[in-house]
Amino acid sequence: MLTRIATILLCSVAPVALIAQEVELRSSDEFISVEGQIVGFNGVMVRVLTSVGEVSVPASEVVCFGAGCREIVASNTFGLTADVFQGINDGTQTATQAASDEMTIAFAVPAFATLYRTVSGAFAVASQTATDVTLGASGEIALASGDGAQTARISFAASDAEGDITVQSVSLNGTAPAAFASPSDWAGNGPFSQQMIGLDAFSVVVAPNAEISQISVNDLARIFAGEVTNWSQIGGADVNILPLQMPATSLIGSDVANLVMQPAGKEIAGNVLTMAQEAGIVASINQFPGSVSIVSTGSANPDLVVPVAGSCGVAVAPTPFNIVSGDYPLIRPIMASYAQAPATQLVTELFDFASSDVAQVLLDREGFINNTTIRQDGGTKNARLSGLLDASFDSDQRDAAAEMFQALFDAERLSATLVGGQVSGPEGAWNRAVLLDLAQALGDPALAGREIAFVGIGESTAGSAAAVAASAASAAAMQAAFALMASREIAASDVTLASYGFGDVSKVTCIDGQVAGSEYTRIEVWVR
């Protein structure tokens, strides 16, 4: 089949295909590496026919390697010239652009310095790229590209100074301006405002006599702002609420302010009871009637934890799968935030390494959540698909539900889950980290030869048909981005890619993007 497709493509662009030769298009950080025949150019994107199909590559972000580069530039009929590439390397020259970074790094809380030291130390020892890495005794890291043309140095900022890079928790709730119009923007070489390097999560613990089975993020903010004072106001028992918190200067205290209160536009009331130790708060929930608190998931008593709902009312429990997938609302993505984008790809490469299996195992030992790709249990998947059979749908939803049941009944969901369409800087950073890890997951022999499906679940104010169309378009765009980012891994594992869009027929969490608009889509990843 691939041979037939290639033949059709070659015939459709006959004047070009007759002189096309194999080339490699590679970014300076080796994040993009695509091998095949160049078959088109639209002024921005080069189309390449590869062993896994046709993919598009941003020409300005790659170097063209191979003897065929000069020939295609000289002979093509679609306006491709040498100066649209970062460079051309036909084996007789180097094309790396010279650049240098001198940056300082600061930490929102001391614990994040440990996270950074873990990632940078592992990168120095385990990195498989040509980058030369030197660690200094004071936490400084020096990076140099293999040819020495690019260099970067990151040192700790003074304790009372802001850094060029800040490691901090960043909310995926609330609103934020658009930073990326499409997946090709955050999947390329940047510039980026954030890169994700770690993950943690909160759990909500509630005294049993409150008699609630779930709570919304908005109600949490209202409770800690002093606007809701009795559990009966949000469907619980007629019991006064006693909110407990860690000090505002603690990791949890600052994160609750940033990730729960700030997106809701509220501040914690002055009469909320503050306790110095998280263990003391957890123990007090059983002792103080009507009490409630937000604690780290690793410290929570599972018997007192309640699921949390976003704006749509779908409550999600803080299970490992729901946290890693981002289905659970109270996750704490920890990101390297840039005051100014780096001039080199070396800094990007360092923080991309945080998504590697090696780095995540080490971060897990330091108390952070290992966010590498995992599989959902079959019972949860079966319950979800079975719910399609007796749900009430309009005609467009009914067609989508039937297709979803047929396409996924023999598949299993992976935790990799992405934000579709236009996204903010933090959402782009989340997506990038997810696809980096998904590419590594293809090394699992159990996935060899299988189909990886990008499944759009979305909604639209224009109705069900528009929701299905938007979710299908977002899923197709995500599939294309992954084909570009992971072409080698896809070929090595012999997987095929597919995409589907099912609108809002089977939401498992609220679909709230940060960028204002009428359409929001989440892209799940399934394997069959």
Image (cartoon, rainbow, N blue to C red):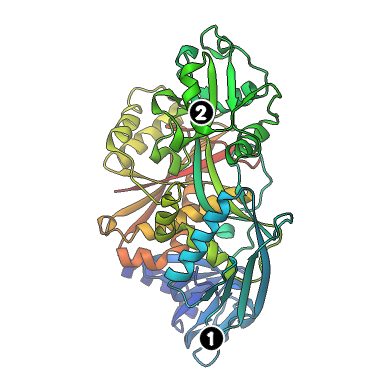
- x then y, percent, for residue 326: 48, 41
- The answer to whether 319 is drawn above or below residue 394 in the figure is below
Identify the image quadrant of residue 268.
top right
Q: In percent of the image, x 54 and y 18: which residue is there?
A: 291
Taking the spot 41% from the left edge, 70% from the top edge, the residue there is: 50
Q: Where is residue 271 in the image (x, y as percent from the top left)?
A: 69, 21
Give the mark toward the camera: 1 or 2: 2
Choose top left, top right, bottom left or bottom right for residue 444. bottom left
Query: Can residue 188 be seen in this snapshot?
Result: yes
Along the polypeptide, which appears first: circle 1 or circle 2?
Answer: 1
Is residue 27 found left or right of 103 in the rendered image? left
Q: How crowded is mark 2: few (under 14 residues within 10 Å), some or many (20 or more)?
A: few
Residue 206 visible in rendering: no
Could you tell me which quadrant the N terminus lies in? bottom left
Q: Is residue 194 left or right of residue 503?
A: right
Task: Check the image and report above or below for 46 versus 300.
Answer: below
Q: Which residue lies under the disc numbered 1?
A: 89
Provide the residue designation for mark 2: 280
Q: What residue sits 45% from the left and 51% below the top?
A: 366
The kind of residue on which mark 1 rests is Asn
Q: What residue type is labelled 2?
A: Gly
In this picture, residue 13 sits left or right of residue 4? right
How many numbered marks, from 0 up? 2
Which residue appears farthest toward the right when viewing the image? 161
Above or below, 486 against 459 in this view is below
Residue closest to the far bottom = 92
> Dot 1 lies on which element?
strand
Q: Do the residues labelled 1 and 2 touch (CB within 8 Å)?
A: no
Within 10 Å of the Cα at label 1, are there few (<14), some (14-19), or many (20+) other Cα atoms? some
Q: In which quarter of the image is residue 324?
A: top left
Query: Could you give the CA–CA distance between mark 1 and mark 2, rounded to whole angstroms?
Result: 63 Å
| Image position, residue 71 (x, y; %) | 52, 87
